[in-house]
Amino acid sequence: MLDIALKISLALILMAILLNAFRLTIGPSLPDRVLALDTMYVNSIALIVLMGLWLNTKLYFEAALLIAMLGFISTVAICKYILRGDIIE
């Protein structure tokens, strides 16, 4: 049962990442693209965690944690750049 649920979840997360990539390339404005990129990294974290569950290794969970930290910092930096024009004051 868990194997079927993992495969369905992986397929749905991959579809969500593809839709995020579409919004990232077609997005009508810059905030839409930033939001698509933010959502894409959250979906990639979910994908990595699901792969860790499927392969039963702890290494994927550490990678997901690193991606979460880098994604948060990059989202803050991009938003700061959009609002102020520079990242470091």
Image (spheres, rainbow, N blue to C red):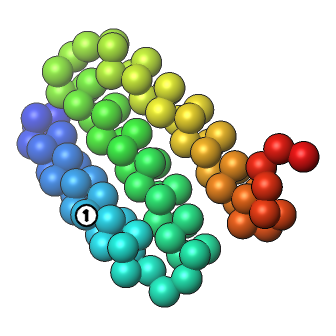
Q: Quadrant of residue 32?
A: bottom right
Question: Which residue is depicted at the point 26% across and 13% down?
Answer: 57
* Residue 14 screen position, x and y as percent: 22, 54
* Res 5 visible: no
Q: Is residue 53 above or below residue 29?
A: above
Is 86 or 19 nearer to us in this picture? 86
Q: Is residue 63 above or below residue 70?
A: above
Is 16 or 85 nearer to us in this picture? 85
Question: Which residue is depicted at the point 34% across and 32% down?
Answer: 49
* Residue 21 screen position, x and y as percent: 32, 65
Task: Please name the amino acid that badge 1 sits on.
Answer: Leu
Given the current orientation, which residue lies at the most extreme top position? 58
Question: Which residue is depicted at the point 12% across and 44% down?
Answer: 7
Q: Is residue 60 above or below residue 57?
A: below
Given the current orientation, which residue lies at the most extreme right position? 89
For residue 34, side relative to residue 10 (left or right): right
* Residue 65 screen position, x and y as percent: 50, 26
The count of marks equals: 1
In the picture, which quadrant includes the N terminus? top left
* Residue 27 screen position, x and y as percent: 44, 80
For residue 59, side relative to residue 39 (left or right): left
* Residue tagged 1: 18
For residue 37, side relative to residue 19 (left or right): right
Is 87 or 46 nearer to us in this picture? 87
